[in-house]
Image (cartoon, helix red, strand yellow):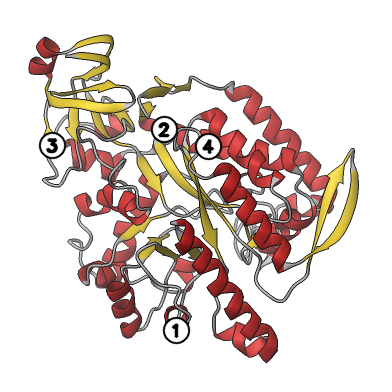
Amino acid sequence: MKADTLIVGGTIATMNPERQVIENGALAVAGGQIIAIGAANDLREQVQADRVIDCSSHIIFPGLIDVHAHAGHGIIKSIGMHSGDRWEDICGQVYTQASPPDFWYAEARLAALERLRFGVTTGVSLLGGGDTIMRTDHPEYAAAHCRGVTEVGTRSVVAVGPTRAPHPHNYASWNNGRKSEYPVTFEQQFQTCQQIVDDLHDTQGGRINIAMLYPVLRDEHERDMTAKDYATACEQAQLVRQYARDKGLIFTQDGHWRGSVRRAEKLGLLGSQTLLSHCIDLHRDEISLLAASGSKIAHNPSANASIQGRCPAIEMMAEGVTVALGSDATAPDRSADMFRHMQQAMHYHRTFFKNANVLPIGQVLEMCTIGAARALGMADRIGSIEVGKQADIVTVDLRRPHLFPPNMALHRLVCFANGNDVSNVMIGGELVLDQGRATRVDEEAILDDAAEQAALMIERINCADDLMLPLGFWGAKGTDT
């Protein structure tokens, strides 16, 4: 058998339907796909490979998948995060008023590099944030983001959509340091999204895909909007959902809680291609609605929403709902490290139930591999190490003090590893991280570009004061006693 690459040695956590674990295993890759899996001794004899990667003392597993995060956040890390809602205000201001294409390109490369080094091979990125403020006034912003991700080499599902009604919203562009402001209508944003889908969906060998989004409609929106504006928002949500359905795209919403799933069901937004994030403090009947509709859930255990309320992930999974893990990263106070979020998820639910057996180690690993692939409609291509699937493969070097002694490799991976333990990352058969170094890009150049864009952003919105340590940073007293 001829192969491009043979990975030998180590423990393979396949995440296949039998959840097979192969000690001293090997796998062969050709044409971007996995063509053989088995014992190292057998495949060494059966496979002639152009390249052999020795992964002795490593664990080998499918690329991690992050089903909910935000583009743009990587350059706004920490700014204003200690001052109530100030951080979200900054997001809204930057994403509408102070983010030219160069910003989105620099941030995309930074965030994709972070994901890559943490073993995240596929991630969802909403093109904006705050109260779901999308940068969809023109296609150039999504194009810049996708160009940055593509250069690094990871897979991305980029979620785009209109900002919540009422419209118009005020946006701005920058040219040679000069700012031009203009109103943006729903029609303009929707047309922009359709252009983005036409130009970018299922491109770069399937590494770039587009999802559609409309902001969540909750009790406060019906209460605070005029009846006309609320009715318009409902109509817009249905229009975006129908477009996603017609195009076969994922439809996602950010920030469901306390009755909003009922509203989504009444509007016809649920379904097998629907991905809802956070989902805190759901009513019992809402869990049943999600199960009956086949809707998928992005659970973000490290997010602020999971502090404000509880996502009943355990109860949803018990009713057959697919629940996958998201980072909600890479800011204000968290990263794209899915190991961190796996560990957080276990503690989050075990604390609630006061039961250390809740959310077993293997189940939480499923939530950011094969379960996450299922949530994105990609389980036939990625999420497990099986013959015929894309070769999205990660290795972690277990020969480290915090990952010893050398037994129970899966336990060590989930409970003790962190993203910095990732040694190699293969995506579509291409080794894009080799012994901890990106192979496609100059990492230092990415960091320098991000620093430059951050400085320009701070100048544009005049937020230097938000970089100061706030009152209360050291606690109530702030001094030693």
Q: Which residue is label 2 attached to?
A: 420
The residue at 58%/80% (across/down) is: 234
Res. 471 visible in picture: no
| Amino acid, disc 1 | Lys
Pinpoint residue 350: horizontal percent, then vertical percent: 26, 64
| Amino acid, disc 4 | Ala
Looking at the rendered structure, the secondary structure element under dot 3 is strand
Q: Residue 266 has which mark? A: 1
Distance of label 4 from label 1 (alpha carbons): 37 Å
Distance of label 1 from label 2 (alpha carbons): 44 Å
- Among the two numbered marks 2 and 4 on one chain, the one whose residue lies closer to the N terminus: 4
Which quadrant of the figure has residue 432? top left
| Amino acid, disc 2 | Asn
- Among the two numbered marks 3 and 2 on one chain, the one whose residue lies closer to the N terminus: 3
Pinpoint residue 337: horizontal percent, then vertical percent: 43, 43
Looking at the rendered structure, the secondary structure element under dot 4 is helix
Which quadrant of the figure has residue 10? top left
The residue at 44%/77% (across/down) is: 268
- Among the two numbered marks 4 and 1 on one chain, the one whose residue lies closer to the N terminus: 4
Distance of label 3 from label 2 (alpha carbons): 23 Å
User: Local crowd at mark 2 within 10 Å, few (<14), some, or many (≥20)?
Assistant: some
| Amino acid, disc 3 | Val
Distance of label 3 from label 1 (alpha carbons): 44 Å
Q: Which residue is label 3 attached to?
A: 21
Pinpoint residue 407: horizontal percent, then vertical percent: 14, 33
Q: Residue 112 has which mark? A: 4
Distance of label 4 from label 3 (alpha carbons): 29 Å
Pinpoint residue 346: horizontal percent, then vertical percent: 29, 58
